[in-house]
């Protein structure tokens, strides 16, 4: 497109008429006066501009004209007066592409503002949900009622950091009558040494040990539980993971809701307690600052589909009515399937206010990503549609992306910055709230926040293309319906 006032063309005209060289004239300040200017150029009337800027890009498509130049030069050669007269040749068609660009920028900016608003709203709602949850936990406890005897099933597999202290916390329960059943599949499992130590330390407790290598399905944990179940003496059953650590009122807290006959299953959220390794701390942040807050937020809005293997308490009759543990022997999300089957019986799944601690140990980045990829794939097979929208819960990355998009429109900058600050402040408060409750240093893991949020986004994206998961150094093929098949 030719410019209205081509710089080189105008310089040549001045040189030819007045004898000044082009290099001599470049950059000299002109006082421009238009004679009969086209309406598109009236903004330049009587303005001091340089020769290089006598044509604005936005006006290039409007007129093509011949220019008549009259120049008067001052003696000091610092200022010239240019009289320009347009002789219009023809009007050009508007440049559709140049008109569409501002529209595209506006749409992109609106998308950015919407992303910022969603990120800020989610971050604030999470804080509200956690506040409501903590208020519920601090509510007065109902009067003590007679407690039924309980069997606690603890499947074990190998030695873990803190395993002795975790198992010992279950032996110290203040409950009138309970049994603990430990189960392993390998007679050489190192966890047996810790179990024998606890048996000797608590001779008054009813502790049974089951060693049975029989495999009932691809899910090794469920197979272990199936082998342990015949040793259970009581009708109230609690299945708890080996990495959990609890206080002395745990059994009472999780069995109390089962006194209501409309309740079929009791489960718990939990908090991650990391080992000193950086990857372990990143893994605990995944649980404490994304996964569990998401569960609590869903609970606040009435969702009751959560069930965690950290604690599953139910009656033996309920377990028999859903077909026993054998119905879950080939499923990756056995705990979620158990909750669904209980709800199909017309019974409620209750989220206990008790929050056990889970020892979180990740020796390296590969172990961390394998662990979190298995969790993400579990969520994907459980909720295929809503899983695609899970990025809305990544408040900080979503807010940063929204800020980049909103930068296309300067008029929205104030709103964009406000929403960004709301998202960031809420995210930092979420991080500090968990650390304050642990009585740990508030700033020790603060520098890990960007890495943690980016890693969550990466694992979520990667899970869309993953059909294999790794669980305790065993690789499984995962089908679309959540069934797993052990690979050779």
Image (cartoon, rainbow, N blue to C red):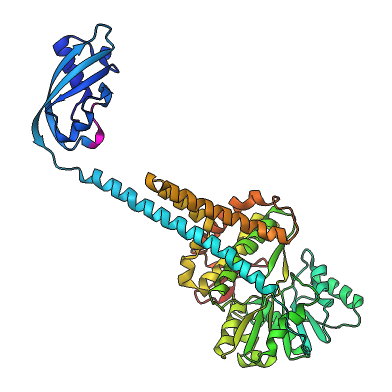
Residue 108: x percent and y percent?
36, 52
- Give the quadrant of residue 373: bottom right
Residue 206: x percent and y percent?
85, 84
**Between 155 and 128, the one nearer to me in the picture:** 128
Q: Main secondary structure of the magenta part?
A: loop
Above or below, comparing residue 289 to residue 328 in the picture: above
For the record, the magenta segment spans: 54-58
Above or below, comparing residue 208 to residue 50 in the picture: below
Q: Is residue 252 left or right of residue 194?
A: left
- Give the quadrant of residue 89: top left
Q: Is residue 227 left or right of residue 424?
A: right
The residue under the point 64% across, 55% down is 365
Above or below, comparing residue 95 to residue 119 in the picture: above
- Give the quadrant of residue 455: bottom right
Residue 262: x percent and y percent?
62, 90
Q: Is residue 180 left or right of residue 68?
A: right
């Amino acid at each position: 497109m030719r410019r209205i006032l081509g710089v080189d063309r105008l310089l040549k005209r001045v040189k030819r008429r007045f004898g000044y060289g082009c290099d001599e004239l470049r950059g000299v300040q002109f006082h421009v006066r238009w004679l009969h200017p086209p309406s598109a150029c009236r903004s330049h009337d009587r303005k001091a501009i340089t020769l290089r800027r006598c044509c604005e890009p936005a006006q290039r498509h409007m007129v093509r004209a011949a220019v008549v130049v009259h120049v008067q030069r001052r003696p000091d050669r610092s200022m010239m007066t240019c009289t320009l007269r347009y002789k219009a040749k023809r009007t050009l068609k508007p440049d559709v592409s140049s008109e569409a660009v501002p529209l595209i920028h506006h749409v992109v900016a609106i998308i950015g503002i919407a992303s910022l608003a969603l990120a800020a709203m989610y971050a604030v709602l999470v804080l509200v949900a956690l506040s409501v949850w903590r208020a519920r936990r601090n509510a007065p406890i109902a009067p003590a009622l007679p407690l039924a005897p309980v069997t606690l099933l603890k499947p074990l597999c190998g030695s873990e950091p803190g395993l002795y202290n975790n198992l010992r916390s279950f032996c110290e329960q203040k409950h009138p009558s309970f049994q603990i059943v430990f189960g392993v599949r390998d007679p050489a499992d190192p966890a047996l040494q810790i179990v024998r130590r606890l048996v000797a330390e608590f001779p008054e407790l009813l502790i049974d040990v089951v060693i049975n290598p029989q495999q009932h399905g691809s899910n090794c944990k469920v197979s272990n539980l199936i082998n342990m179940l015949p040793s259970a003496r009581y009708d109230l059953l609690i299945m708890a993971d080996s990495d959990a650590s609890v206080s002395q009122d745990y059994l009472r807290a999780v069995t109390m809701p089962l006194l209501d006959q409309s309740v079929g299953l009791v489960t718990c959220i939990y908090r991650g307690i990391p080992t000193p390794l950086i990857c372990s701390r990143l893994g605990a942040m995944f649980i404490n600052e994304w996964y569990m807050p998401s569960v609590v937020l869903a609970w606040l809005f009435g969702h009751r589909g959560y069930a965690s293997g950290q604690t599953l308490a139910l009656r033996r009759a309920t377990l028999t009515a859903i077909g026993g543990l054998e119905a879950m022997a080939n499923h990756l999300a056995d705990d979620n399937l158990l909750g669904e089957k209980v709800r199909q019986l017309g019974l409620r799944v209750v989220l206990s206010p008790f929050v056990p601690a889970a020892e979180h140990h990740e020796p390296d980045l590969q172990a961390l990503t394998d662990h979190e990829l298995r969790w993400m794939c579990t969520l994907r097979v459980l909720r295929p549609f809503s899983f695609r929208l899970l990025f809305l819960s990544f408040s900080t990355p979503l807010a940063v992306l929204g800020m980049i998009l909103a930068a296309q429109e300067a008029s929205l900058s104030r709103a964009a910055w406000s929403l960004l600050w709301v998202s960031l402040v809420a995210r930092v408060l979420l991080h500090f709230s968990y650390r304050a409750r642990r009585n740990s240093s508030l700033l020790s893991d603060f520098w890990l926040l960007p890495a943690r949020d980016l890693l969550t986004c990466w694992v979520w994206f990667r899970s869309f293309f993953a059909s294999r998961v790794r669980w305790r150094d065993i690789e499984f093929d995962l089908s679309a319906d959540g069934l797993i098949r052990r690979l050779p």
